[in-house]
Amino acid sequence: MDGDATLETIDLIEKTAKTIYYTADCAIGYEAANMVLKGIEGFRDDYEEHILRHRCTFQLYQPVPCVSLCPAGVDIPGYIALISEGRYDDAVRLIMKDNPLPAVCAYVCEHPCENRCRRNMIDDAINIRGLKRFAVDNAENILPEKKADSTGKKVAIVGGGPSGLSAAYYLSIMGHDVEIFEKRKKLGGMLRYGIPNYRLPRHILDREIDTILSTGIKVHTGVAVGNDISINQLRDQFDAIYIAIGAHFGKMMGVEGQEAEGVISAVDLLREIGDEKYPDFKGKNVVVVGGGNVAIDAARSVVRLGAEKVTIVYRRRKVDMPAMKEEIEGAIAEGIEILDLYTPVKVEKDEENRVKALWVQSQIVGPIKGGRPKPVKANRDIERIECDIVISAIGQGIESRDFEKEGIPVTQGVIDALDTTAVKNIPGIYSGGDCVSGPATVIRAIAAGKVAAANIDEYLGYNHIIATDVTIPNPRLSDRLPCGRVNMKERDSYDRIKDFDLIEIGMTREEADQESRRCLRCDHFGFGVFKGGRVEKW
Amino acid sequence: MVNLIIDNIKVQVPEGTTILEAAEKINISIPRLCYVKELNEIGACRVCVVEIEGINRLVTACNNVVHDGMVVYTNSPKVREARKTNVELILSQHDARCATCVRSGNCSLQQIANDLGIIDIHYPIELPRAEWTEGFPLVRNYEKCIKCMRCVQVCDKVQDMHIWDVANTGSRTTVDVTLNRRIEESDCALCGQCITHCPVGALRERDDTQKVFDALADEEMITVVQVAPAVRASWGESLGISREVATVKRLVAALRRIGFDYIFDTNFAADLTIMEEGSEFLERLNNRATSKFPMFTSCCPGWVRFMKTQYPDMVDHLSTAKSPQQMFGAITKTYYAQLLNVDPSKIFCVSIMPCTAKKYEASLSVMNDAGTGRDVDVVLTTREIDRIIKAEHIDVATLEEEEFDKPLGVSSGAGVIFGVTGGVMEAALRSAYYLVTKENPDPDAFKDVRGKEGWREASFDIDGTTVKVAIASGLGNARKLVEAVRKGSVDYDFIEIMACPGGCAGGGGQPIEEGKQLAYVRGEVLYGLDEISNIRFSHENPSVIKCYEDFLGEPLSHISHELLHTDQNEWALYEESEKVTDKEGKPYRYGKQLAYE
């Protein structure tokens, strides 16, 4: 970095580091050498750039840390500033510029934005999702942005989940005629058929969907594209199509006896609940296999459906579970047992083909691959967990076969679309969300919908601008003294397991005022003010 | 309205006013380095910090707004110490050998360090190591950059070219060319707006003054100098003389003192440009079906570079006419050499331009049509000629006014307004009207094209034909206009574009005055010169008429095409030949990086 090195210097560093790695006794020696080697391996370009041009290869596109981590690029410091001024309607309108499902995200977003919050350097990240929830709960009048003049262009959206709804909203306010084709009875996708009411109350979801539809979107529910109507028929009737069918097919465990009565898929169970059919689990002993949010949602739902005992079986350690930490803690508080380091081996049945027990193999934690330790079969006998119901929650697939038949490219089960959401070589067809990425988060699905809307608009020959006239308040000047983060409380676990009502209790005004003023306003200070703290339109 | 107290003085300002502006209202000028109103309010330098009662940390005054009841101290002990320390820290990464800096005496950092009484820096000096491309017309001295980010901002926000960006991290943060390109690989238009916005000497033009001194010293060389229109409106600024004293005739006197053999006016060539470009436009109008419309002016090389890099498919929309500078060079080394009866290789042609891109233009090999090397040998910016005047210790204020030489020093008022946005269009319309109707219009008939808006339009009736024209200055505006043309949302016949906001008057080679945008003030000077001019029409310039009679024949003649027109497609973006050598064949040392030991 002092500019003294030549290209040969890199080779010398590499050789030296290798030798140290091979010969050092102490971890300080070989680990340091290993880090150097990894650096050369991963960033050789950057090393060379420093030698040849005395500079880094880095480029900065979004200078505000929280915004840069939000897949949809929501103007977080902007809406937090509005909340601190009590302007909740404006806060929600600002969010809707980039995310037409503010309430959904206020309740269930995984908030990747909080990870790199600069407030972490002082005390703790801002409770961004909590503030957003305060805004949506306290906004009085949420209206969609004004629609542009009608273009007369028709766009079909296949799938009414978060990605389809987002694309539909933006395309509709751009002035296109949008029609959504949804296989199920109601819109919402995984928001309705995957996430239980106690996390995302139905009336909140319905209100949000109504706001989106109020822009003049036509909806066809109970229509399965690929079955009731073909993609090619849609192509004849519409100028562009966005496929966002999600990942709704529950994978099975692939173990002996899984066809037994009482083995069900978590996705199917949550779907039933989504249609407000509540199966009875009274007195049942239930085992849920899996460690993701779907496993936790299924487990917590069956607790509410009267199960006597609910156990989660997970093949890695509890700390490795991909489910959100708050969800796991909530589940434990509700009396759910988590048995980690076990994989299912077989389902034991009785004479009537009903589940009697799940046999599991103990695992030991093993070498780290791809950032997570791999479970390895332990040298122990298989064990028996007596149960009446086994719920499989080990992942979801995409029902892509009908689409593949009509020429939509599918690679390893997911629809093959570019990062612009365009499907290669098929002009006018776009795809995004879980059916392209595999099961992921709501906010990523929303982001894909937004990208699709922009690209479809352009494909149709337009360049509509999505913006809002909300003005963002100037920051308050203060010393940014350390102050605790406001976390949200939950309903008492004894009460809450008796119903499907909302668990989480929103912030009070007092809390929201304090929390919103903790924001460091990276949009205004530092790099944000230089490179533009916000994307005002897209 | 908001009430607050600054340094114990009560002040009332509208809501949303910055602390810095509120202080200005009561004549307290808070020291600042990086701030440019509306362009760069980012608090990068941390010099404008102030203390606010009730807040322990200091706050930048340039980008924070006042609140009711605020009590501000701009010179508390805490502020004083912080401001001084911050300037010292900036100096610790700045090559402060002011004695050899072109901005010495006109440098915000030097000024502030002097004002704060900094006579010692308590930090080790650490200068960045990076090498600029030797010989490039635009020079960046990494060791002088104070990371104010103004160049990034003007290039992004005004010129929309995005040539500069932050490079590296932490204490090594600096500014460099975007996308990790070398400057010569970039699409830099060479407008020089980054230079005129630089508060220090980190950006400047390639200094070509020594080449001129060498030519002046060579007894065998006949030195011919041309003075661009906009130079006459600004040359006195960095010499500290008033606009009233800094007349073009006094500049002529100074140039004669310096020793130039013949002192001519680019305005003559501007008149010639009108004859050629105006005729070309009329020819295109007469052959509408086969011609490219709209036609764009081509006298601004920054704009031509822009077109070549941003919209290469539209290069044929540019007029084929060379710029006045290049027409002048070609005429000097042919027609004028014949008049003098000398070998054109003995003529050394110097131009004084408000422009950095002109250095590039003159270096293009396709420009050399007189058959004897470069048509224009050296291009000096206004700043460089001022440096020469200083070096020659000429007291310009005491000089008597002198006249340009003849015949290439004769020009019209139409030629002089080439230096301001809209001027080329106005001059062209005056003569186009005449060429079509054989009658002169009222010289002020086309005043509608004047103005400060970045993009203007007008339409005029010329003998029953409506001519729709547009004018843009600043490349950001140019991009908007070209995009609109491409989309078909506007319909123009003739478009004038100048790369610098306000036109050449605001050119990247003009004198720099911190905190001032003088383009329109200088533009008014040029309009004033046009108004008092005896000749208001290019086609009435007697020297131009004679040049056609004796040499060129008529506009768009064969010889005109040879000498005065160019194939814009042939322009290279960067030629190695720019690496000019001195008499001994050694390269001139431009922007050579010397590290402190």
Image (spheres, coloured by chain):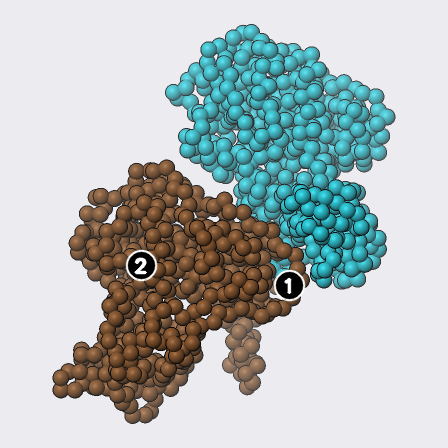
Chain colours: A brown, B cyan
Q: Quick one: SS at disc 1? A: loop
Label 1 amino acid?
A: Arg
Task: Please report whichever mark, 2 or 1, sits nearer to the chain's N-terminal start.
Answer: 2
* Whether residue A280 is situated above or below residue B165 in the rendered picture: below
Measure the C-alpha gap from mark 2 to mark 1: 40 Å
Left or right side of A485 for B76: right
Seen at 68% across and 24% down, the residue is: B524
Q: Position of residue A41 (x, y in %)?
A: 49, 68
Is residue B455 something one can see in this rendering?
yes
- Number of dots carrying numbers: 2
- Residue A188's label in the rendered image is 2
Label 2 amino acid?
A: Gly
Is residue A346 something one can see in this rendering?
no
Left or right side of B259 for A85: left
Q: Position of residue A439 (x, y in %)?
A: 33, 65
* Whether residue A436 is situated above or below residue A143 in the rendered picture: below
Left or right side of B339 for A246: left
Q: Determine if marks 2 and 1 fall on one subunit.
A: yes
Residue topped by disc 1: A480
- Residue B248's label in the rendered image is none
Subunit that carries the residue with mark 2: A
Subunit that carries the residue with mark 1: A
Mark 1 closeness class: few <14, some 14–19, many ≥20 residues within 10 Å: some
Quadrant in the picture for residue B484 = top left
